[in-house]
Image (cartoon, rainbow, N blue to C red):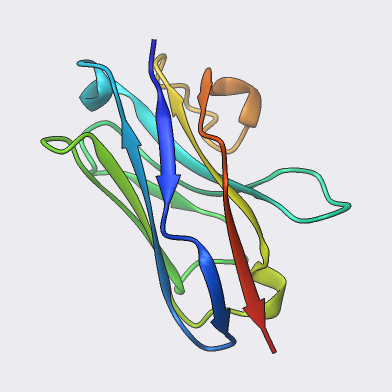
Amino acid sequence: QVHLVESGGGLVQAGGSLRLSCAASGRTFSSYTMGWFRQAPGNEREFVAAITWSGYNTYYADSVKGRFTISRDNAKNTVYLQMNSLKPEDTAVYYCAADSFASSNVALDREYEYWGQGSQVTVSS
């Protein structure tokens, strides 16, 4: 069992930056693929970014590529999402998720067994 807790959300002006953190419990965190997803009101949950267990491979949605960076610190059982050049359309609840099977389909939310409670990110224009 893995318990995930996000932090770092908030209100920021367009063009600003935020860093989300996701702290995980469980000794096997370092073997999991970790992902970030987001859901805006009235929209379906969408993939944002993912990182493999080693941190060597990262994946991004086209909408955030070049602006967001996912990273992880396995010694701290934490995954991060650095968000720069934020836009109003980035406003959403952001969720981190863990995939213990290291699926190749990192953008599919059904591949992730464990989810955090979400962190609100609001970008004002």
Q: Look at 89% across and 52% down and name the residue there.
A: 42
Picture quarter with the N terminus: top left
Give the farthest residue toward the left. 75
Task: Estimate the x, y position of residue 109 in percent, counting from the top left.
Answer: 63, 31
The answer to whether 118 appears left or right of 54 in the picture is right
Asked whether the viewer can see residue 38, the reply is yes
Q: Quadrant of residue 79?
A: top left
Give the farthest residue toward the top. 1
Q: Look at 42% across and 37% down and name the residue there.
A: 5
The answer to whether 119 appears left or right of 57 in the picture is right
Nearest the eye: 39 or 111: 39
Nearest the eye: 5 or 55: 5
Q: Look at 23% across and 44% down and name the residue there.
A: 56
Residue 66's place in the image compared with 82, above or below, is below
Residue 2's place in the image compared with 98, above or below, is above
Asked whether the viewer can see residue 62, the reply is no
Give the farthest residue toward the right. 42
Picture quarter with the C terminus: bottom right
Q: Quadrant of residue 45?
A: top right
Task: Estimate the x, y position of residue 85 in percent, counting from the top left.
Answer: 49, 83
Task: Estimate the x, y position of residue 88 in percent, counting from the top left.
Answer: 69, 78
Nearest the eye: 13 or 68: 13
Q: Look at 67% across and 83% down and name the residue there.
A: 124
Task: Report the number of numbered marks.
Answer: 0
Task: Estimate the x, y position of residue 21 in percent, counting from the top left.
Answer: 36, 51
